[in-house]
Each structure stands twice: as C-alpha cells, then as structure tokens.
Amino acid sequence: MENHLSLIKTGYQEIEKRVFPRFPFNYLTFKAQNGQERVFAVKDISFTGMQLSLKDGGHPYKVGQSIVGELHWRGSVLSLDAEVKWVHGQRLGLKFQDGEEFVGEIKDFLSIENIVKGMRALHNSAMDLDLPSDLRYWLQADGPVEVFVWCHNDGEISRFQLVMMESFVEYQDGKGLKSGRVLTKRDLDTPLVQEDEFVFEMDETIDEERLSFAKSIIKEIPGEYLPSDVFDFLRLKLRIS
C-alpha cells in the first residue's frame, strides 16, 4: 500500500511519489463566508496557503476569486482572506493574503504546541481502520503533520516519514535520511480503502531547516504516543542529541 516511484530525475531535481493511508475524519475545517456558506475539510495547510476539499454538494469558486472565511481547529478560530489559485472539482487551492499581522496569527495557529495538542495516535484508534500490515505507528494532526513508522516482519523499524506542511523528512534502511518539499497531494479513493498520493521534490542533500522542524515535533510528542524504543530510533536517525 505504501510505495514509492522516482518519476523524474534531471540534474539535482528528483521527484518521487508516496502513497499513504488517509484517516476518514478531519477536525481542521474552513468555513467560507462569501454569500453561500460552505464548510471544507482542510486537506493540507502551510503558512502561505492550503488545499480544501468539499465532500458533498458544489461550490461557486473560480480561479482568481477572493475568498473570506474562518479556520476552525479544536476550539481555535482564525479569520482569513485568501485567493483561489486552482480548482479541481470539489478541491480548491488557496493562497493566503499577505500581511504582517496575519503571518503572526497563522504561525501561532500552526505552532508546534497546537500541532502536538491536535495529534492523534491512529494506530491505537478504536475505529476499524484498514492499515497496511507493515505500518506499525501512525500519528496525525489533521492537515499540518503526519508521522508514519513502518516495520519489518520481525518488528524492526524499516522506515519512517514525517510530512510537515510543505516539508517532508524520511528515513529508509539502506538509504538513510532524505528530505523534500510537498508538491501535490490528492485523494486515491478505492472501494475498500482511502489513500492519499503525495508527490515530493527531493532535496539534493538533507535540508537542515526541514530536519530542524522534524526534530522539534518529535521532541514535543507525548511519551505515551509511541514506545520508548521507537522514540529512541527516531531521535537517533534524526540526530536529536
């Protein structure tokens, strides 16, 4: 279920795919207020924009149009203005309007503290989730962050990934640590399982800023979310002292 494929390799640019399971519920939403109210699920988000998905019904938004509304996440609300950059059916890509005050507000809204507060250990979920057999641990904070830890049949960790807004950090046996930038994310719905396909532009060498972001998240995750030996492995491979 989780797979990867190198698509393009030109000079220093390497584009790769990953397919990950998708949790069916999202507590991070955007309530549009342009006349006709619509509540969108936030598929992914960064400090500069977000991707929205509308499960039912249609919407009137077109590329270039301004959109006003509120982000809602576990009791926190953030008002914002944005511009529609692309439209694909029920999905929208928005770019936030610039402004020094808003930049501070979105960084507070997506702070490490809020991300970790909104994180769930999906591998311990009471729901009957259809997970890949080798996906042993899965942490998710709705749109901003997901952590996947995969294991061999003997229980040893084979690889892990952190998807952190626009950034990606991965460790694989025999390949070491890699980082990259999220280019696209799209649904891959099938009759039996819900998945997301990510496309990443990989960095030529490990990006220290992305690595620092990954470290800061792992440091703040509550101890009960993962076994101590898994935390030790993540700290070792991410070079957390």
Image (spheres, rainbow, N blue to C red):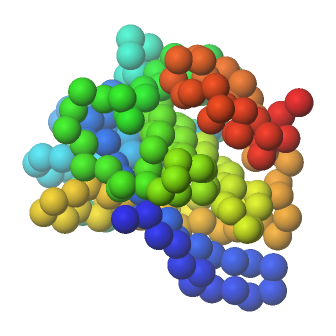
Quarter-wise, where is residue 1 in the image?
bottom left
Quadrant of the rendering where the C terminus is positioned: top right
Q: In the depicted view, which residue is nearer to us: 12 or 62?
A: 12
Q: In the depicted view, which residue is nearer to us: 89 or 16?
A: 16
* In the rendered image, the vertical position of residue 150 relative to residue 187, given as above or below: above
Whether residue 195 sits left or right of residue 98 in the image: it is left
Q: Residue at x 31, y 42 (%)?
A: 23
Residue 24, how many percent across, how many down? 25, 42
Q: In the depicted view, which residue is nearer to us: 206 or 56?
A: 206
> Residue pushed farthest right?
241
Q: Residue at x 14, y 51 (%)?
A: 58
Q: In the depicted view, which residue is nearer to us: 155 or 202?
A: 155
Q: Residue at x 52, y 72 (%)?
A: 4
Whether residue 141 sits left or right of residue 215 in the image: it is left
Residue 50, how many percent across, how many down? 48, 45
* In the rendered image, the vertical position of residue 29 relative to residue 146, given as above or below: above
Q: Residue at x 47, y 70 (%)?
A: 3
Quarter-wise, where is residue 206 in the image?
bottom right
Residue 231, how many percent across, how many down? 66, 31
Whether residue 118 sits left or right of residue 170 in the image: it is left
| Residue 83 appears in the figure | no
Residue 112, how many percent across, how many down? 64, 24
| Residue 235 appears in the figure | yes
